[in-house]
Image: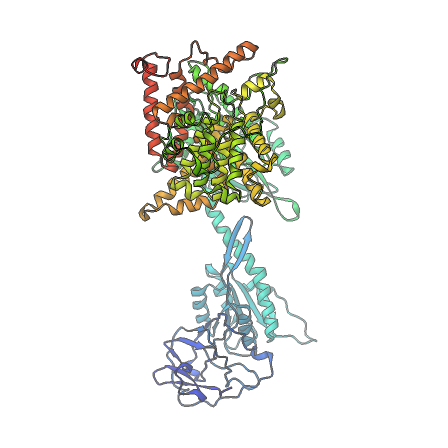
Amino acid sequence: MGCAPSIHVSQSGVIYCRDSDESNSPHQTTTISQGTATLHGLFIKTDAADSIPSVLSYQSRRRHQQPPPPPSAGPRRRERREPGASARARAPRCCGIEAETQTSSTSAKVNGGRSGRGFPVGPVRAFLWQQASTTEVQIGPMRLTQDPIQVLLIFAKEDNQSDGFWWACDRAGYRCNIARTPESALECFLDKHQEIIVIDHRNSRYFDAEDICRSIRATKPSEHTVILAVVPRTSADQEETSVLPLLNAGFNRQFMENSSITACYNELVQIEHGEVRSQFKLRACNAVFTALDHCQEAVEITSEDHVIQYVNPAFEQMMGYHKAELIGKELTELPKSDKNCADLLDSINTFIKKGKEWQGVYYARRKSGDSIQQHVKITPVIGQGGKIRHFVSLKRLHCTNENNKQLCKSHRDEKYTGDNSQSESHSFKCKNRRRDSTDVKSITSQSSDAPSLQTRWYSSMARIHSMTIEAPITKVINIINAAQENSPITVAEALDRVLEILRTTELYSPQLGTKDEDPHTSDLVGGLMTDGLRRLSGNEYVFSKNTNLSHSHLSVPNTINDVPPCIAQLLDNEESWDFNIFELEAVTNKRPLVYLGLKVFARFGVCEFLNCSEATLRAWLQVIEANYHASNSYHNSTHAADVLHATAFFLGKERVKGSLDHLDEVAALIAATIHDIDHPGRTNSFLCNAGSELAVLYNDTAVLESHHTALAFQLTTKDSKCNIFKNIDRNHYRTLRQAIIDMVLATEMTKHFEHVNKFVNSINKPMASEETSSHSEGSDCECTGNIKNFSDNQTLIKRMMIKCADVANPCRPLELCIEWAGRISEEYFAQTDEEKRQGLPVVMPVFDRNTCSIPKSQISFIDYFITDMFDAWDAFAHLPVLMQHLANNYKHWKTLDELKCRSLRLPSENNN
């Protein structure tokens, strides 16, 4: 170790500190100028008596290495430094010297303190001990951050006791200031607002400690400050003095003289965790009271004995009283309205005394004598010992009588002052035939008497409060309930209707009217979105099971390179949306799925992902296609190939590609391939009404979709030759299987609107918001990246993709659209014929081959199912070609409908 550093004060008042053995090193010199110091882990001091300022300040920061022990912790002696001429130079006079420490890799000891005390003399102190950090404090639901504690030491002279508190502050990480005079103490407190003040009360030679305490207590910031009096130690034979004079002077506690750093540290830490922490929480309550003062509802807080403790300005305005007239009075002292039932108050008291919340209508009497009708909610507040300590009452006016109307008007004028913000417009079209929303204007324009409204309002409130399970829909209902309480009565009535709708089970299924409704739409909904109308005994429909695993008779290529030229030429165009699947059906003898599957699966690297051979994939495609019914006019392997083609096309779009993983792509292609395997050409409603084996097996729920996935996995895993999953590990298989099942089940139409609405709310709207905010950057990478980070969003995208692929016929080129329309109509005609033969309910009566208008059915299908879904999918995937085809095809069907033509083409087109 080198010799102790020397400190010099120049004639200009600049203080220098230099290590004596490294005087040539510029890094060991510290300069203090104009009351500010940058220190290298050193004490800096001067014995010039006239240079001692009235306030000494220091801030501690954590040093990067272990600090030396405090002076009192070891026997290390400090030698007295003889004052030199430079040390007696006059330092500049200032209110306080701020010594802000910095870390250093050098640890040094400083000689020159009082002999035997080990603490330096002088006004400026800085030692790196502990990080002054913030603390998190919880008060109810509020989370607060408390800054490092500040301490003010008021000692006229420096001694062991002041040193003890100084080092205790350093150890605790507190910011510490020292004041020598009453004036500087008050000045420092008004500047810093310290949480703890320690005043030397051992003698009155230099100042009167109680006078200082009173002067500090006279200031507003002292309301939350703890003041500690250091009193002299009494001898064993002396009687301890009373603390009452100290308390009367404004002190909070007394500390018996004890210069031990540990004793001082313990005292300060106890104060921090006790009074200071409590005062900090009380200070935070000012924010709560500010919120209450600006709350538009009238708020009244009473004690458990119903003594008024607080009312907010809204309460004063409502009741006509000033708070000074109410605080401290019992509720029984205030005038009562004679319009309440005689036993109403007793009933309320009985209810709330049990700790239960009460709400209802209550008549109150204003100061003017008028009676006003209020909606009142009284909530008991449980306090110490589990007992009720307060009652909080929230009151708002019911504008149902003449006395209330003027008050209601003034409240509304205040509440709705300012520009009314426009709600976000919905980006999707609303069809007139849909009755899924309620016209608020029609509700609010209806006249309603107060009793019926009151009954409806409180029946709704009771229902909401009886719901204890915090499901998402429960949270929505609670939010609406809260909005009702702050809304005009007409809006509250409309929201009541909203609550009734939310309590139904079919939240996503539009409600069709019963009058003047398009029968084509009604039949489509009945046939596609229900699981059957009713059960008929004695009528069971069992379709033949075509689960032939043998495919030796099928002539298929050994590899994709062995495809016949005519087929290969067609497949060269398979990446185009205008690809003609019917031409492929013709040249492959109604086996397009195998050929298209080999080409598409190779393009997306499915065999590489599944670690299976092309021969295994070929065998699997043969088995799957063999179990589609070629006798079906629509639900056959050509439809499966068409859905596979559309899925592959969507997977090639940049936005989709950037949102999904390779596993998702493989799952989507497999799901598209199997999604209608073994389809009987009949709807779920037909199977349920017929009491089919599948309907019984799957409990009338997603009958066909459940069968498609179950059979596909059964066929795949039954024979190793076609088991494309046999070489992937169990975890990958489970994930892949779940994704496939989820996508196939999404093609069931009963949850069509649920899937579309979830996609719009979870994908379209957030992405539109992100694109708006990042428009200046000219990139959408961040948007797709955010989607990819959430598996739920990826699931919604995959569901939407296969749903659109499954019903993309109206978005195909016109000739393909017309062909598909004819095929699906024929299948529905055949179902209607069979329903009539078997005496089953006819679920889609308009699909009678003798009377049906195919153009009308297509218009209804596009209006009700297609437009909104493809608007949402186009907003995500950007599909201008599809949307143009959709517009052209819709125009074609509308033209035919206007001409009263029931066929697929115009008469002139038929002649051609």
Task: Please tell me which residue lies in front, 904 or 595.
Answer: 595
**Residue 826 to residue 378: above or below:** above
In percent of width and height, residue 457 lies at 52, 27
In this rendering, the count of numbered labels is 0
Q: Quadrant of the C terminus?
A: top left
* Camera sees residue 462: no
Task: Please tell me which residue lies in front, 624 or 265.
Answer: 624
**Residue 708 to residue 33: above or below:** above
Color scheme of the displayed model: rainbow
In percent of width and height, residue 508 lies at 48, 28
Task: Please tell me which residue lies in front, 746 or 628.
Answer: 628
Of all residues shown, which one is farthest toward the right? Answer: 237
Task: Please tell me which residue lies in front, 210 or 101.
Answer: 101
In percent of width and height, residue 855 lies at 38, 17
**Residue 20 to residue 190: above or below:** below
* Camera sees residue 859: yes
In percent of width and height, residue 877 lies at 38, 37
**Residue drawn at 70 percent across, 76 percent down:** 237
Left or right of 904? Residue 288 is right
Left or right of 495? Residue 876 is left
